[in-house]
């Protein structure tokens, strides 16, 4: 077996936690068994497929990366971006949005005053981002949005964007969940709890894809709970506790992102649920959306009902973000036109070595990370 210790930060909390992940023969078998269908569907990817951009003309310039928050994915995205900046002789300053739209805008206003050479920004409140974009433009600063594109009709601005679209991956995950429900609980339809955040287009796409996949494979799917829930871990846990009390008969659980998923899992565990025996779930099938280190702890645990993870790829996404920003700064891409580049998460492949290769390749840049090895 191998073990690594990883430190991450919750969305709204400054507390630091430790997670130890132990991989053994049973975990390797679990990964292979649980993701066989996804591998066959071609929903896997190889880490490191995209090269870093090289733009000598940017040397000596200062840029800002304004994140949604610095969860484990945000930390890895920032670290890969900083690595590129160092190699290119560029100064890249990272702002933690902390999952708070007001705090993020205030920090962005401070950054604007410094007149950087460009800004990469993942807005927390996309619908209200128009005025901030206009401030950035008025200051003559090139801008690229990442995560979700801004709608020109509702925001009044057209901005180049790198768009994360996980609809295809979550659709496939929904189909697999339906098949597993039929296998583990014959004669019982999928009864799903889905925590959405439809004000975030990425979340709307993720949840819509999962529910569509479920319903395609199991038309008798029952929606026990589907509504918007704040994406921080504390709120997610509290809402999941309410759902468990009010409507305990569900058997499928998912949320938009890692911290929301961890909140759900914590509430389920406190209620004596989220358990599995040799990776056979006892009460519910759980999707851990982002494939971050703490979620993988449960995925690789044969006693956990976390049955699948869709891994985001911070290295590839950082590369796409930086390429788009460099192209806007150098005039290759129009600054005030909705030009988009799509990136997507992937279901972990049905092979321990491949899964570990992707994970180590994407998150190995983080401090205190020790590579996972397969038996």
Image: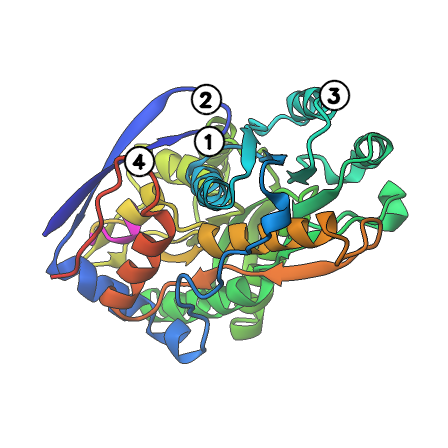
- CA gap between label 1 and label 2 equals 9 Å
Residue at mark 2: 13
Residue at mark 1: 233
Residue 31 in picture, x, y percent from top left: 26, 63
Q: Nearer the viewer, residue 58 or 159?
A: 58
Q: Which mark is nearer the camera, 2 or 4?
A: 4
Q: Residue at x 31, y 49 (%)?
A: 296
Residue extending farthest bottom: 40
Does the magenta segment cover residue 188?
A: no
Q: Which mark is nearer the camera, 4 or 1?
A: 4
Residue 369 in picture, x, y percent from top left: 26, 41
- CA gap between label 4 and label 1 equals 23 Å
Residue at mark 4: 367
Dot 4 lies on which element? loop
Local packing at callout 2 (Cα closer than 10 Å; few below 14, some 14-19, many 20+) is few
Residue 375 sits in quarter = bottom left
Q: Earlier in the sequence, mark 1 or mark 2?
A: 2
Q: Earlier in the sequence, mark 4 or mark 3?
A: 3
Q: Earlier in the sequence, mark 4 or mark 1?
A: 1
Mark seen at residue 17: none
Residue at mark 3: 113
Q: Residue at x 90, y 43 (%)?
A: 156
Q: Are marks 1 and 2 in contact (CB under 8 Å)?
A: yes
Residue 212 sits in quarter = bottom right
Q: Earlier in the sequence, mark 3 or mark 1?
A: 3
Local packing at callout 1 (Cα closer than 10 Å; few below 14, some 14-19, many 20+) is many
Local packing at callout 4 (Cα closer than 10 Å; few below 14, some 14-19, many 20+) is few
Res 230 seen here = yes
- CA gap between label 2 and label 4 equals 19 Å
- CA gap between label 4 and label 3 equals 31 Å
Residue 78 in picture, x, y percent from top left: 48, 39
């Amino acid at each position: 077996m191998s073990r690594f210790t990883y430190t991450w930060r919750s969305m709204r909390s400054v507390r630091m936690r430790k997670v130890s992940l132990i991989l053994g023969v049973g975990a390797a078998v679990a990964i292979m068994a649980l993701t066989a269908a996804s591998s066959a569907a071609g929903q896997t990817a190889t880490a490191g497929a995209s090269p870093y951009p090289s733009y000598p003309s940017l040397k000596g310039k200062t840029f800002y990366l304004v994140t949604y928050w610095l969860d484990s994915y945000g930390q890895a995205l920032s670290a890969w971006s900083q690595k590129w900046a160092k190699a290119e002789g560029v100064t890249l300053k990272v702002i933690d949005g902390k999952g708070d739209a007001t705090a993020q805008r205030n920090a962005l206003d401070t950054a604007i005053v410094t007149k950087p050479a460009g800004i990469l920004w993942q807005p927390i409140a996309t619908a209200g981002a128009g005025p901030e974009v206009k401030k950035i433009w008025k200051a003559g600063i090139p801008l690229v949005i990442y995560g979700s594109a801004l709608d020109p009709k509702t925001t009044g601005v057209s901005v180049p964007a790198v768009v994360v679209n996980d609809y295809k991956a979550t659709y496939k995950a929904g189909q697999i969940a339906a098949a597993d429900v039929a296998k583990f609980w014959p004669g019982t339809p999928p009864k799903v709890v889905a925590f959405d955040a439809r004000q975030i287009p990425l979340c709307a796409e993720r949840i819509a894809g999962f529910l569509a996949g479920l319903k395609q494979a199991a038309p008798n799917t029952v929606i026990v709970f589907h509504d918007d829930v704040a994406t921080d871990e504390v709120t997610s846990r509290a809402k999941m506790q309410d759902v468990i009390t009010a409507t305990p008969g569900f058997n499928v659980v998912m949320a938009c992102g890692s911290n929301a998923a961890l909140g759900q899992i914590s509430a389920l565990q406190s209620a004596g649920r989220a358990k599995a025996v040799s990776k056979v779930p006892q009460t519910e099938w759980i999707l851990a959306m982002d494939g971050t280190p703490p979620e993988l702890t449960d995925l690789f645990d044969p006693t956990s009902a976390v049955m699948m993870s869709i891994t985001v790829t911070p290295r590839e996404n950082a590369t796409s973000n930086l390429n788009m920003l460099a192209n806007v700064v150098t005039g290759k891409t129009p600054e005030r036109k909705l030009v988009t580049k799509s990136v997507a998460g992937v279901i972990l492949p049905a092979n321990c070595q491949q899964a570990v290769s992707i994970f180590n390749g994407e998150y190995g840049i983080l401090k205190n990370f020790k590579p996972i090895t397969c038996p």
